[in-house]
Image (spheres, grey):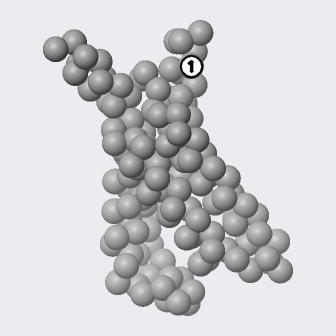
Amino acid sequence: MDRLKALVALAARLLLAQIFLVEGWGKIAGYADVQQYMIAHGVRGELLPLVIATELGFGLCIAAGVLTRLAALVLAGFCVLTALIFHADFGDPDQLVNFQKNAAMAGGFLALLALGPGAVSVDAWLERRKGAR
């Protein structure tokens, strides 16, 4: 059962991380368009490098299971802010769905914050190594 839990935790981390890795690279590829989208929603376009760094950096942390709880907390907050700033037009069914998806991802990250990364992670490897000393 422990092996199954470890594999499920790994799959959960990878599934949560993939959207941030894909979207981070997508923001680089479509930089000017994303910047205009941000400005249209009242967010300074100069923040885009921070957004990209957050998505790619913490996405990689979640995937690898390193600094997992910190990364989960940051990305949970990122999801909530994204939902409130960009997807709060509940009269638009597409935006409502995007709001709900961001809320669900925040919930997944909060669960990761509470439960940790699982045994197949850099964090767990470091703990095992620390305990072996």
Question: Horizontally, is 55 left or right of 1 in the view?
Answer: left
Q: Residue at x 51, y 62 (%)?
A: 77
The reply to whether residue 84 is visible in this rendering is: yes
Question: Horizontally, is 52 left or right of 23 in the view?
Answer: left
Residue 51 is situated, as x and y percent measured from the top left of the image, at 40, 69
Tell me where residue 123 sits by quadrant.
top left
Tell me where residue 35 sits by quadrant.
bottom left
Decide: is 58 above or below 96: above
Residue farthest left in this picture? 133
Binning the other alpha carbons within 10 Å of mark 1 as few (below 14), some (14 to 19) or many (20 upward) gives few
Decide: is 83 above or below 59: below
Q: Quadrant of the N terminus?
A: top right
Q: Residue at x 16, y 14 (%)?
A: 133
Question: Horizontally, is 41 left or right of 50 in the view?
Answer: right
Decide: is 55 above or below 82: above
Residue picked out by circle 1: 5
Q: Residue at x 43, y 21 (%)?
A: 119
The reply to whether residue 15 is visible in this rendering is: no
